[in-house]
Amino acid sequence: MSEVRIHDTLSGQLRPIEPGNDGSVGIYACGPTVYSRIHVGNARAFVTPMLLARFLRRAGLGAKVAINITDINDKIYIAAREANMGSADHAREMMRLYVEDTDALGLGRPDAEPLASETIDEIVDLIGALVERGNAYESGGDVYFRVRSFDAYGSLSNRDPADMDQGDEAGSASLKEDPLDFALWKAAKPDEDTAWESPWGPGRPGWHIECSAMAERELGVPFSIHAGGVDLVFPHHENEIAQTAAGRGEPLARIWMHNGMVQTGPEAKMAKSEGNVFGLAEAISRCGAEAVVDFLISGHYRQPLAFSEEALDQAVARTERFRDFFRSQPQIDGEEDARVSAARAEFNAALSDDFNTPKAMGALFALVLGANRERVAGAREALAEMLDVLGLGGLADEDQVADPEAKRMLAEREEARAGRDFARADALRDDLAARGLEIRDTPSGPRLVRR
């Protein structure tokens, strides 16, 4: 297999993936801030690193994926007050739903899912190193990072200092030496119901320092790939780079990999703040997990991805083409056909070249087209294997719907049709449709598929 390369936002170039000292590829991705349930747009930043790790393992590289959960944040305090709950209780409930929703994608769990609330000691240690080196200072119980003390600041986002608005996480303007500085530690406030002890008094960490500390704890520094949405380039990832390099004298990551946003319009990213979200759980319930994964990899990860219900329907249609292939194509024994070997090579080359999932999927559809026209030995096995790399291995399962109640209803419908009770048969068909299931007639009999 050819060398695997990923576009690095910091250098602007394709760079080969280099394993760490232990021989494995460490991948850290910024996970959710658990103040509300996640949507389809959030899921892209989960799916991309999980599938990249699958491919790397198949390519013979060990991979460890860490996707954090931010459970200490201003947004959580606000959402908890609105829900009339304690902030820790609210974060735990939203975290439970996040795990439930991402579990439903069928991709497994990351190797590590660190919580900010369980990384306080490491956070305090990193802040202490920054204070000791003069890159940070205490003010009124807060601790701030001196942006101008880090000469390389801005190298990731290529921003002019005049345009560096740190946003809501910046801290109190009256306590800062410089408007560019941002908070590493925030003193406890009367309206916040959680606080931790530190050398600077009780308080809580800022968002940016949380990720630097969690990534270092799980993967060491420098690790291979830091992933996340392009919306995090500034200020979040810019600040992560500065904190770790200044505090540890080492870069945080070798490659910075950013996925484009899921958009509901030309300039409108899917975001809770925009009020245009489509819940991940809702999408999976409506279309099935494979169709949602297919949608999220239907465009190159670095490009924006246009969301609509029509786009989800198209993803369903694509996944049904694969399902139909496995239902209709018999096992063909013999030496693997050269066309299968060519499809494997094209698939691997596409994923090795900046994880180009649309091109990889193109190789799979070309294989299906050829195998539907004539006998192609080894096509079923190869297609199932490659689909599994992309999180779509369930499409090779001919028994697509495991719901026993739905299967009972299908059998009852067939009995009603055989008995010429067409009114009952139609009612059962409508009940199945209400569950998001469609009856397809195949050479081996009727089957249920997700609509």
Image (cartoon, grey):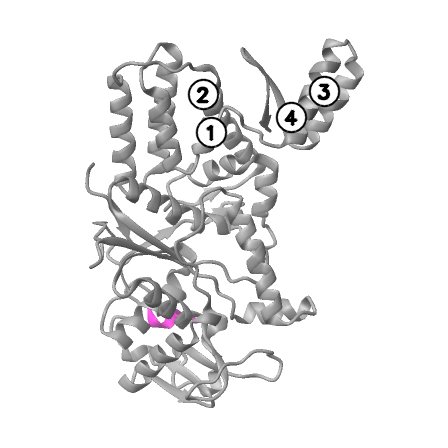
According to the image, label 3 marks what residue?
Answer: 412
Q: Are marks 3 and 1 in contact (CB under 8 Å)?
A: no
Secondary element at image label 3: helix
Indicate which label's residue lies in the foreground, 2 or 3. Answer: 3
Q: Which residue corresponds to the image point at 42% horizontal and 70% vertical from the top-left? A: 210
Q: Residue at x 38, y 67 (%)?
A: 214
Q: Is residue 154 magenta?
A: no
Q: Are marks 2 and 4 in contact (CB under 8 Å)?
A: no
Residue 300: image location, x then y, percent: 37, 41
Q: Position of residue 424 (x, y in %)?
A: 79, 18
Residue hosting label 4: 407
What label does residue 77 carry, if any?
none
Q: Which residue is mark 2?
A: 326
Residue 270 seen in this snapshot: yes
> Which label lies toward us, 3 or 1?
3
Where does the magenta region start and end? 160-166
Q: Residue at x 54, y 62 (%)?
A: 34
In the image, residue 42 above or below residue 83: above
> In the picture, residue 343 is in which quadrant?
top left
Residue 71 in the figure: left or right of residue 90: left
Q: Of helix, strand and loop, which one carries label 1?
A: helix
Closer to the N terminus: mark 4 or mark 3?
4
CA gap between label 2 and label 4 equals 20 Å
Q: Which residue is mark 1?
A: 395
Residue type pointed to by label 1: Leu
Residue 35 as seen in the image, left or right of residue 82: left
Residue sitting nearer the eye, 266 or 351: 351
* Distance between the alpha carbons at the discs numbered 2 and 3: 25 Å
Q: Looking at the picture, how far across and down is residue 360, in whole percent?
A: 33, 32
Q: Earlier in the sequence, mark 2 or mark 4?
A: 2
